[in-house]
Image (spheres, rainbow, N blue to C red):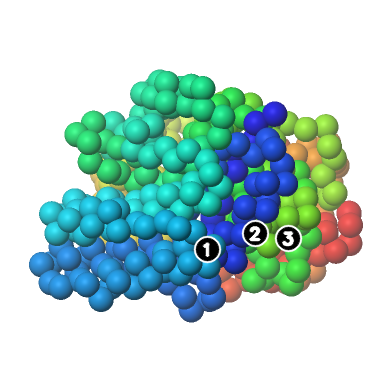
Amino acid sequence: MVKVVKFGGSSLASAEQFKKVADIIHADDARKFVVPSAPGKRFSSDTKVTDMLYTCYDIAAKGKGFDDKFNEIKKRYYEIIEGLGLDLSLEKEFDAIRAGFIGKAGRDFAASRGEFLNGKIMAAYLGYEFIDAAEVIHFNDNGTYDADLTDISMKERLNGIERAVIPGFYGVMPNDTIKTFSRGGSDITGSIVAAAVAADLYENWTDTSGFLTTDPRIVKDPAPITTITYRELRELSYMGASVFHEDAIFPVRKAGIAINIKNTNKPEDPGTLIVESTSQKPAYTITGIAGKKGFTVINIEKDMMNAELGFGRKVLEVFEKNNISFEHMPSGIDTMSVIVSQQEFEPKEQEVLAGLHRNCHPDAIDIETDLALIAVVGRAMKSNRGTAGRIFSALAHAHINVKMIDQGSSELNVIIGVSESDFEEAVKAIYDIFVTAKL
Ligand code: ASP
């Protein structure tokens, strides 16, 4: 049995946290490959080392003195090393990083050193081999992740190695410079390593016991999700539920490896298991509710629209030309609505309107802003009658006007558009009818 274990920044923020992590690793012999993040926040007003590195590099890149900031970063690491009682010097590494800052090695190089140094400490503490992610994780010239080359390097390098620490978040470009994934990207590294070593499980250790059925800022102590499918998770994370980097799903999913989100501070909690498919019935008809504010609807009206071949294409062409991706497109006989992100749309509003007039000759265009979208997601909705009915009666009882409804053909989710001012109340009403009332 082989498990790849990734630990997030808060799990590695101090020597105390490192000790918890080592206990977790030692408690299960299968935990052979460890992917650490950089030290995160120790308390809520603290600064993540990644952010300290960005700030420090920006000062260095302007040619200003950066010693004070650099020493603060060093101090974070030496506090951990001393707290663990390790006989480890990182002076050579710090000298090389300083030289990289002076030589303008790039912001990605700077940020990546957070994981690199934490990996060094972790490897020394566990007595595992350290493998630099720059040896095994590759990016293409255009900055996208190179899965094929990574697969080859990873297999070659890991051949015959039983246990190792591989820092998260970064890899190398064809020109040998360091490149990082987007923020939170250590999750992706963990997933890539899990796929490369054909792990039985990818454990992702963080500071919450997995996913909750909804946002705890809206509903107090929402029920946890014990098992969720990849597709359900995609729907929920796309709509704002965040615990795990969205792109981290793909490498393990392709390899059929499940992910277990676990809590470093409560290792006894089962956490959330993310799987391809499952016969396990969810505790409720719905698996989760997520949502986001900040959408705009563009309503387009034209008599006999339904008879006009290619009308939808002409509409979408305008959005494509303006580099705006659409979220949903509900339509009627003579109306079509396009829902887009307000932030993307606003700066190009007049270009889009002019384009629609030119391309589609509509009778009227009407714009509505400040829309919130709510996704009600659940694999059990398919086999339960009356789910939509219950959602809408709950919203009606809460006096909430539904502006848009979209149910995907997969019957995995129902998307509901409400006014932003109704967003929180709508989420609560839906939560109550399914979870509190256990329907
Ligand atoms: N340390 C990086 C960040 O703060 C990457 C990660 O934690 O996954 O985004």
Residue 273 position by quadrant: top right
Front-most of 21 and 106?
A: 21
Q: Is residue 168 left or right of residue 408?
A: left
Within 10 Å of the Cα at label 2, are there few (<14), some (14-19), or many (20+) other Cα atoms?
some
The correct choice, above or below, for 290 with respect to 64 in the image is above
For numbered disc 1, what is the local secondary structure?
loop
Nearer to us of marks 3 and 1 is 1
Query: Mark 3 vs mark 1: which is more N-terminal?
Result: 1
Where is mark 3, residue-wise? 266
Q: Residue at x 42, y 37 (%)?
A: 131
Q: Quadrant of the C terminus?
A: bottom right
Disc 2 residue type? Answer: Lys
Mark carried by residue 20: 2
The correct choice, above or below, for 393 with respect to 75 in the image is above
Disc 1 residue type? Answer: Gly
Residue 256 position by quadrant: top right
Q: Are marks 2 and 1 in contact (CB under 8 Å)?
A: no
The reply to whether residue 375 is in sight is no
